[in-house]
Image (cartoon, grey):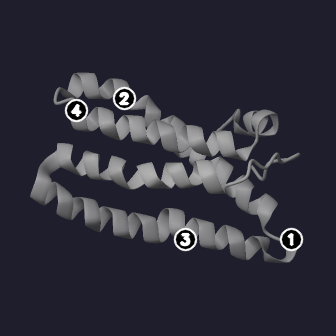
Amino acid sequence: MVVAGMVIRKFGVKPVLLAGMGSLLIRWIGYALIHDYRLALLFQPLHALGFASFYVAGVTFIDTLVPGRLRSTGQTLFTVAFFGAGAVIGSNLFGFLFDRIHGSGMFYVAAAIVTPALLGLIVFVPNIRADEPAL
């Protein structure tokens, strides 16, 4: 998160969002394929990259895209989706999946869910270059 502002100014929001989602996709596929926790630990740094990149770029995207008078509302909706609804739905869905198809299957489902989102991001989201990122 420390260098996110510089990276966003240099490359724009879209590449940072792609890096975040892409690193999470690689991490989940890695977790699904590896059954030795010592090897799985090699994929754990991708969580930091994925979370930080996606969160900071998401906040910046909303701040840049939404008109000034609606920025608080935009940030609130982003936060609700990211930490509220996403956490509640994700915890319940992946808890259910873990009980039914265990860890590997659960991570394959996570990868299957994020893949079309990543493709949609590539196709539909413009690259916005923010002069001053929100964070």
Furthest-front residue in view? 123
Amino acid at the residue labelled 2: Phe
**Secondary structure beneath label 3:** helix
The residue that disc 4 covers is 33
- Of the residues under marks 4 and 1, which one precedes in the sequence? 4
Asked whether disc 2 touches disc 3, contact meaning CB atoms under 8 Å apart, the reply is no
**Secondary structure beneath label 2:** helix
Which residue is pictured at 28% across the width and 52% down the height?
109
The residue that disc 3 covers is 80
Instruction: Name the mark on residue 68.
Output: 1
The residue that disc 2 covers is 43
* 25 sits to left or right of 66: left
Q: Position of residue 88 (x, y in %)?
A: 37, 69
The front one of 6 and 127 is 127
Amino acid at the residue labelled 4: Leu
Asked whether disc 4 touches disc 3, contact meaning CB atoms under 8 Å apart, the reply is no
Asked whether disc 4 touches disc 2, contact meaning CB atoms under 8 Å apart, the reply is no
Which residue is pictured at 72% across the width and 46% down the height?
13
Which residue is pictured at 78% across the width and 53% down the height?
134
Instruction: Name the mark on residue 135.
Output: none
Q: Residues within 10 Å of mark 3 (few under 14, many from 20)?
A: few
Residue 55 in view (yes/no): no
Q: Is residue 135 above or below residue 95?
A: above
